[in-house]
């Protein structure tokens, strides 16, 4: 793609990076076939190619974002299916990140939009606040129908739709501390506690710690960890995201220097995509560029780490698992085979749903901010999963778990919960009474 940025514009490193990304696009349109919003809406401006044109025009002309640009950028899920498809290697992720930061800095959103985003940014990254908000949701639930009829309040209705009616008790394993290896020590790792996940499903990290320590891996939950920054990063709130990244880099480097780390284990693939990008996010910060790159190099999804431990294989157990590959896993981190191979080796029969490349519609806060599009994508995803006739759904991201669970009666668990069960742990509570279908 030909660009016409001025030399003065290109002195801004963010603009220079975006210009280099734009130049790689050859207008081929392959991305449109795998873009969930284009497949759903059929609007060229809701495809990666269309958004690239809008971003180019906005940045090249040095304009503030307008309502049209914001509408179509907001509809992007950041699922990154387009990057998997693109034959030219267009780095759409960092281009749309820049566009979102530009929007945040130059566009004044309508009052209710600003309020909704401020609430999300003030609540979701903080477990105690999030837990309180979920308790308060029970009082708001009777008003959900009314909220859905008022366009400016649909996001709050979507929050109530997603809020669980009961909240699990916090896991004692979520507290900072050291979890010693129960077998001959073969590694030492830190685990990201996270923000929303330990509130919604504390059993995910608990299963991870149990499994790793049984396998001889020492696990440390560092003191002072904060949200990975993914939520505010995708809202364009760059300074907040970078502050979170710096705080976590400091925490993990302290652990590296104190006892050494083989990896930083992440059990939410959306967080993993962001943490693996810390090196890029902080590349312009001379005090943190090298440190952030070091942390990013150590970040591993739990299935990525387990794949290197050479686990034993089990005989088939007659349970069919539909594996839903989260977008942040398959497109963001390019981890596609490890989770399925681990499940198969553990004795599960694994089936791939049709259209596995398409997003389920969760995408961080997308199912709150864009509830109609999200609902269409969820229904499509659930139809494809249910067509596999699976007993269980496995995935690697809490957002996908929460989203898909509201559309199907098939139990959905994190991949690591099934692996913990297969390698000596108790059957997950969600599976009690499971009657396997014929494989």
Image: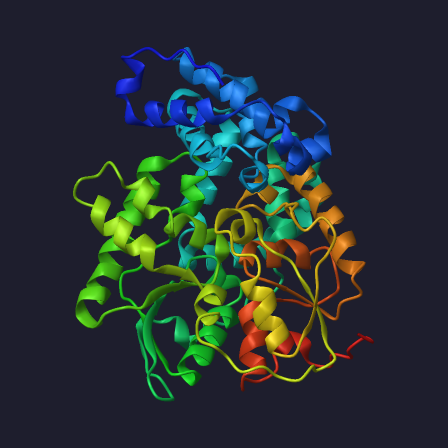
Please state which of residues 191 and 117 is positioned toward the viewer in this rendering: 191
**Residue drawn at the location 31% of the way across and 59% of the way down:** 225
Q: Position of residue 294 (x, y in %)?
A: 26, 54
Snapshot quadrant of residue 26: top right
Please state which of residues 381 and 336 is positioned toward the viewer in this rendering: 336
- The structure's colour scheme is rainbow
Q: Is residue 357 visible?
A: yes
**Residue drawn at the location 50% of the way across and 16% of the way down:** 66
400 left or right of 66? right
Snapshot quadrant of residue 401: bottom right
The count of marks equals 0
Q: Is residue 25 above or below residue 287?
A: above
Name the quadrant of the C terminus. bottom right
Q: Is residue 414 visible?
A: no
Furthest toward the front, the residue is 87
**Residue drawn at the location 67% of the way across and 31% of the way down:** 38
Q: Is residue 311 above or below residue 263?
A: below
Q: Position of residue 61 (x, y in %)?
A: 41, 10
Please state which of residues 201 and 285 is positioned toward the viewer in this rendering: 285
**Residue drawn at the location 33% of the way across and 70% of the way down:** 189
Q: Is residue 102 above or below residue 419?
A: above
76 left or right of 316? left
Q: Position of residue 290 (x, y in %)?
A: 21, 48
Q: Is residue 341 above or below residue 63?
A: below
Please state which of residues 237 and 24 is positioned toward the viewer in this rendering: 24
Furthest toward the bottom, the residue is 183
């Amino acid at each position: 793609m030909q660009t016409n940025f001025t030399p003065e514009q290109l002195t801004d490193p963010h603009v220079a990076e975006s210009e280099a990304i734009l130049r790689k696009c050859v207008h081929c349109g392959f991305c449109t076939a795998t873009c969930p919003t284009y497949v759903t809406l059929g609007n060229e401006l809701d495809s990666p190619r269309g958004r690239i044109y809008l971003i180019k025009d906005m940045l090249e002309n040095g304009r503030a974002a307008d309502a049209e640009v914001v509408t179509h950028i907001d509809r992007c899920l950041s699922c990154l299916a387009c990057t998997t498809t693109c034959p030219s290697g267009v780095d759409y992720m960092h281009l749309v990140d820049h566009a979102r930061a530009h929007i945040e800095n130059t566009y004044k959103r309508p009052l209710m939009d600003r309020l909704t985003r401020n609430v999300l940014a003030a609540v979701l990254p903080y477990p105690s606040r999030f837990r309180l908000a979920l308790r308060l949701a029970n009082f708001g639930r009777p008003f959900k129908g009314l909220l859905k009829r008022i366009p400016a309040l649909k996001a709050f209705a979507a929050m109530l739709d997603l809020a669980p009616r009961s909240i699990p008790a916090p896991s004692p394993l979520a507290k900072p501390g050291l979890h010693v290896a129960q077998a001959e020590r073969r590694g030492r790792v830190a685990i990201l506690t996270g923000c929303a996940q330990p509130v919604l499903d504390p059993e995910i990290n608990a299963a991870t710690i149990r499994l790793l320590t049984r396998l001889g891996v020492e696990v440390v939950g560092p003191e002072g960890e904060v949200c990975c920054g993914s939520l505010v990063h995708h809202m364009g709130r760059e300074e907040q995201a970078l502050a979170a990244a710096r705080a976590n880099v400091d925490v993990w480097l302290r652990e590296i220097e104190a006892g050494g780390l083989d990896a930083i284990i992440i059990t939410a693939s959306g967080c993993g995509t962001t943490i693996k990008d810390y090196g890029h996010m902080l590349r312009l910060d001379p005090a943190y560029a090298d440190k952030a790159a070091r942390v990013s190099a150590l970040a591993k999804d739990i299935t990525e780490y387990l794949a290197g431990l050479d686990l034993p294989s089990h005989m088939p157990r007659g349970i069919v698992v539909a594996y839903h590959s989260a977008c942040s896993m398959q497109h963001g981190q390019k981890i596609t085979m490890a989770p399925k191979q681990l499940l198969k080796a553990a004795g599960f029969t694994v089936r791939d749903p049709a259209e596995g490349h398409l997003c389920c519609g969760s995408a961080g806060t997308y199912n709150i901010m864009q509830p109609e599009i999200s609902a269409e994508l969820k229904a499509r995803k659930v139809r494809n999963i249910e067509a596999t006739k699976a007993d269980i759904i496995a995935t690697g991201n809490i957002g996908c778990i929460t989203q898909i669970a509201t559309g199907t009666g098939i139990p959905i668990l994190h991949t690591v919960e099934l692996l913990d069960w297969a390698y000596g742990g108790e059957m997950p509570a969600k599976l009690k009474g499971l009657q396997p279908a014929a494989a």
